[in-house]
Image (cartoon, rainbow, N blue to C red):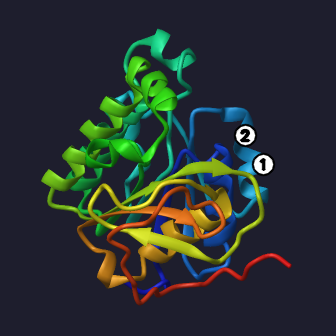
Amino acid sequence: MTQTGMRVLVAGATGRTGRVVLARLAETAATVRAFTRDADARDDLLAQGADEVVVGDLLDAEDAQEAVVGVDAVISVVGSTPGIDAIRGNLVDGDGIINLIDAATAAGVSRFVLCSSIGVGDSKDGIPLSMRAILTAAGVLSAKKQSESRLRDSSLIHTIIRPGALTDAPATGEILVGEGGDSVSGSIPRADVADVLVRSLFTEATENRTFEIVSRLGLRNSPNRLVELPWGGPSVEPAD
């Protein structure tokens, strides 16, 4: 997939990771559409690199359908807040992303990149037991597992990225990529995650695969099943 003429939807654009994804995409030739539930965030999103802003709720199937009209690719970085969102019932990590996947499939979207999390599915041992217990009780891990499964079962060309614990540290540019669930554990800056999500759009070798990622500095325990990928797209330079 080339950058020229491509329209990319960023779902979850107002989140801390979503805003970094917007900034990374702004460095490409793609037209960037931000999707948010917060109508008051429109001006901020345009200032941060979005060319278009769509306001809606992914838990509403019609809003999801509107979001993907005319879109070539989707990067989803939506997520729930354990405790708060669990009280509301349906989690955007599950039903919301599933609505987005179904809408993207029906609209003929070419590419879908999903930001999930280490701890989901066969990567469950990659997070500390205490955190796993919290996320399990909140229903977050099961919701993310359902959306991962829906994406794999869809006809969409997709990449699933499972980052470790997210930090707000500067990008390191040194990312360890594992594949196979029980691969890597630890932490990673959001800026590094955003780089991987964006570059996955332009890297054929990531198609229809699931990866776990941490930064080299954030690695916890010994890594397994590391893979090297011929990354395309814009690269990120580590901070000084």
- Dividing the picture into quadrants, the one containing residue 132 is top left
Q: Residue 66: where, in percent of width, then height?
A: 40, 44
According to the image, label 2 marks what residue? 41
Query: What's the mark number on residue 44?
Result: 1
Q: Quadrant of the N terminus?
A: bottom left
Could one spot residue 7 in this view of the protein? yes
The residue nearer to you, when weighing 123 against 51, is 123
Q: Quadrant of the C terminus?
A: bottom right
Left or right? Give the position of 154 relative to 222: left
Q: Position of residue 125 (x, y in %)?
A: 36, 43
Q: Marks 1/2: CA distance?
A: 5 Å
Q: Secondary structure at mark 2?
A: helix
Q: Is residue 77 above or below residue 4?
A: above
Query: What kind of residue is marked 1?
Result: Asp
Where, by quadrant of the figure, is residue 91 drawn? top left
Q: Nearer the viewer, residue 163 or 152?
A: 163
User: Are circles 1 and 2 on residues that touch, CB within 8 Å?
Assistant: yes
Furthest residue toward top: 87
Residue type for callout 2: Ala
Residue located at (60% from left, 80% from top): 28
Q: Position of residue 70 (x, y in %)?
A: 38, 62
